Amino acid sequence: HVARELVERIIAAAEAQGVHALYLLTTTAERYFPGFGFSTTTRDVVPEDIRESEEFRDACPASATVMCLKLPS
């Protein structure tokens, strides 16, 4: 329950700030995040500034699943 609440709070905060999309990398939770509306995508469609983050460049393996949640504008 705590994890669900944390994800819901992050999504709500992003919406309140006018964020258009959230991206994540996972090696274990590909089945968890679709319950929040995330869908699998590819690294090449992720905005460049996010692809240049430490997580995308070094912290997560290239085999990690990339997921995206488009938020209402």
Image: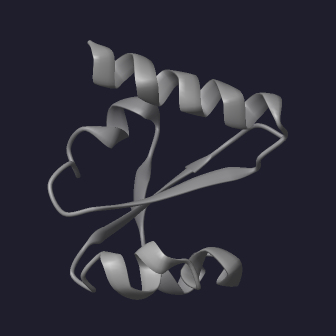
x then y, percent, for residue 15: 74, 33
In the rendered structure, the answer to whether residue 58 lies left or right of residue 70 reads left
Q: Nearer the viewer, residue 29 or 56?
A: 56
Identify the residue shown where x is 27% and y is 86%: 62
> Quadrant where the N terminus lies?
top left
* Observer able to see residue 42: no
Identify the residue shown where x is 41% and y is 17%: 5
The colour mode here is one colour
Q: Which residue of the protein is positioned furthest toward the left in this rendering?
A: 28
In the rendered structure, the answer to whether residue 26 lies left or right of residue 72 reads left
Identify the residue shown where x is 43% and y is 31%: 36
> Quadrant where the C terminus lies?
top right
Q: How many numbered marks does the figure carry?
A: 0
Q: Which residue of the protein is positioned furthest toward the top in this rendering?
A: 1
Q: Nearer the viewer, residue 28 or 69?
A: 28
x then y, percent, for residue 72: 76, 37
x then y, percent, for residue 17: 82, 36
Identify the residue shown where x is 42% and y is 53%: 39
Instruction: Tell me if residue 8 comes above or below residue 46 in the rendering.
Output: above
x then y, percent, for residue 68: 51, 56
- Residue 50, by quadrant, is bottom right
* Observer able to see residue 24: yes
- Residue 65, by quadrant, is bottom left
In the rendered structure, the answer to whether residue 52 lies left or right of residue 65 reads right
